[in-house]
Image (cartoon, rainbow, N blue to C red):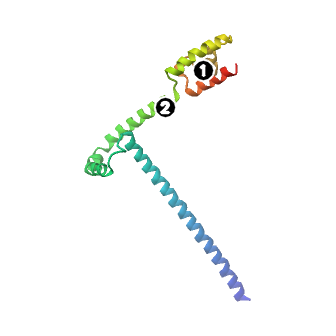
Amino acid sequence: MKIDELNEKIKKNKEKFQKLERDKKIKLSEENREKRRKRARNLIMLGALFEIEDLHKEDASALLGFLHENKSIFFKNKNIYFKIGENLLQNRKKVKNKEVNEIGKDEIKELLELVNIFKSKNKDLGVFIQEKFKKKLFQDLTKNEFQIIKEYIKNL
């Protein structure tokens, strides 16, 4: 009877051990996957930086040689380069956001045409913009708000 009990305990402990081994492998796999994901993201970001500076088409050997020869200069002036890079990225982001969100000359021309449509329906586009978006100038509208105005006019 004692041997059967011991064998049962051994069996249960083996099962527990096997489960812990599986859990350990799963955890290691998740950690490795996360490391690979972070590495891939970092490499993509570095590639994007080369693209921003229009160096992405240059020969890899030439770029590596340049980086190798200038590595000590980089580390010596890293803080200066950090500030320069930060400014470049911020300016790029501002330009990109402006291009994506703000309406341009073509949309303003179309808005001026929409003013006439509003007038023909005895409505005031300026009042609509102020009430709906809390804005006073056409150029302050985003492209999304411009689309809302166009949809509204379709339903007038």
Q: Amino acid at mark 2?
A: Asn
Secondary structure under tag 2 reads helix
Q: Position of residue 93 (x, y in %)?
A: 45, 34
* 125 left or right of 86 in image: right
Secondary structure under tag 1 reads loop
Q: Nearer the viewer, residue 6 or 88?
A: 88
Q: Which numbered disc covers residue 97?
A: 2
Report the quarter where the N terminus lies.
bottom right
Q: Residue at x 36, y 40 (%)?
A: 54
- Give the residue pinned by disc 1: 134
Label 2 crowd (10 A; few <14 / some 14-19 / many >=20) = few
Label 1 crowd (10 A; few <14 / some 14-19 / many >=20) = few
Would you place residue 17 above or below residue 117 in this image? below
Badge nearest the viewer, 1 or 2: 2
Task: Answer whether residue 66 is visible to the viewer in this image.
Answer: yes
The numbered mark, 1 or 2, whose residue comes first in the sequence reads 2
Q: Amino acid at mark 1?
A: Lys
Q: Residue furthest right?
A: 1
Report the quarter where the C terminus lies.
top right
Q: Position of residue 36 (x, y in %)?
A: 48, 57
Q: Residue at x 55, y 23 (%)?
A: 141
Q: Nearer the viewer, residue 155 or 71?
A: 155
Query: For residue 148, what is the image quadrant?
Result: top right
Q: Position of residue 37 (x, y in %)?
A: 49, 54
* 149 left or right of 78 in image: right
- Determine the CA span between mark 1 and mark 2: 20 Å
Task: Answer whether residue 124 is visible to the viewer in this image.
Answer: no
Q: Nearer the viewer, residue 90 or 124?
A: 124
Q: Nearer the viewer, residue 47 or 94?
A: 47
Q: Position of residue 113 (x, y in %)?
A: 58, 15
* 85 left or right of 24 in image: left
Query: For residue 128, what is the image quadrant?
Result: top right
